[in-house]
Image: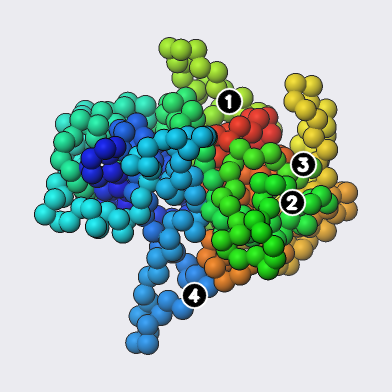
Amino acid sequence: MGVWLEQRISRCAIFSLCSASVHIPSEQLLNTHLAYRAQRAYVFPNYIPRDHPPFPDTLPNGTRHMLEVPMNAFVSGPTGGGPLSADHTDSILRRAVSVEWWDIVCPPENVVSVKLYDTLQEMGLDGGSDGKDMMDKWANKLLGMSAPCISIVDGSPFDYIFIGSSRVISIWPDYSNSPVLQYFAWSPLITAAIFRHFHFLSDDAPPKSLAPVGEPPYDFQSFRPYISSAPPIPGLLGIHVRRGDYEGHCINLANGGADYNAWNLIGTPGLTPATKDGYVWPALPDYLDIPGNQSRRDAAFDHCWPSPAAIVTRARKVQVSAASEDALAPQNLRRIYISTNGESSWVTELAAALRADGWKVASSLDLLLTREEKAVGQAVDMGILVAADAFIGVGFSSLTSNVVQIRLGGGRDARTIHFW
């Protein structure tokens, strides 16, 4: 769900079927960018957990009551109502607002419904349309509409199928320079969690970008949003390793000939289109390569589901490369943070193998999160992966793709981003 409020006069538009999963913040970010292009203010939805959060969500009669977590628990910055400029001089009427505010300023009698599929047909768009063409036409459509409150029904312009495909790539040159990515920030709740566990990530004291305001004991209001452009955590290699039921997903992806997810495709040779202004694309060093002795299926599975031995080998290779990179300030990678949903026994085995190779290791399982932080635990992991000096992720994963776009948007060097 997304909403916009135009500058100077109250004009809004809402996406009634927009995804609100923390796995797919790309949709929220693209909608925020579209709002920016249309000179309107994005209105953020609440997050409805698919899994049971660490809060009671079952009614006395045994039925489940879906809880809604405020989007501000995850993000600040433009998508969460923050400023659209570095000096905060942008109009407050262009900043994002909550869906609750939509309910106040757009009563039902003021809402005009726009049917998604009818509008796509009107604009000459379909399931194969290029992403830049889609973004441009939707922005012009919304910019030109005069109705005070617009509800886009029957779907979202940027659904998960589109976002997971290569069609999204052509949006990047414009999108990457948008304040949506340049001023992206994690919520104070995420800042607090990373600050409290910083000893797992570095031998140094937490930087100013994480430091609370005032004296202890600290509470939620002591922390500020954690901007993605803050200096990285020196020496930290963040790695994303999926386990659990992801093995079956990897088998299906490999059997189906799937490509990497969304922004993870940017490094694929020959994929990024030429631009009229000579835009230089980020030089991601990795892509879905196929060794000569492997089939595409087997190579894809190995990229998706690396063994502990393969993880140790890859981490060592990235460490050596980072220390000797000529055009990049050398990185002394010595700590690893493992973002994973793996079982404790498996994570313990992997951590032991990495320690045997000389790394200091911490993982998602080491974090002692509060009840509120557990509800946004994956965002805590993503915040750490974005902040790390270097990153290795799963090319097929949407979570990895989100880390990639936020790292690049915040100014991280593309050469610090790797895949298994």
The CA distance from mark 3 to mark 1 is 22 Å
The residue lying at 83 percent from left, 45 percent from top is 334
Residue underneath mark 2: 206
The residue lying at 79 percent from left, 52 percent from top is 205
Q: Residues within 10 Å of mark 1 (few under 14, many from 20)?
A: some
* Amino acid on which the number 2 mark rests in the picture: Pro
Q: Residues within 10 Å of mark 4 (few under 14, many from 20)?
A: few
Comes first in the chain, label 2 or label 3: 2
Viewer can see residue 416? yes
Query: Does 409 sit above or below residue 216?
Result: above
Residue underneath mark 4: 55
Comes first in the chain, label 2 or label 4: 4
* Amino acid on which the number 3 mark rests in the picture: Pro
Residue underneath mark 3: 234
Q: Is residue 159 left or right of residue 280?
A: left
Q: Are marks 1 and 2 in contact (CB under 8 Å)?
A: no
Q: Nearer the viewer, mark 2 or mark 3?
A: 2
Please state the horizontal and vertical placement of residue 63, each as a whole percent of the image: 35, 80
Per the image, label 1 sits on a secondary structure element best described as loop
* Amino acid on which the number 4 mark rests in the picture: Phe
Which corner quadrant of the image does residue 301 belong to? top right
The residue lying at 77 percent from left, 57 percent from top is 200
Q: Residues within 10 Å of mark 3 (few under 14, many from 20)?
A: some
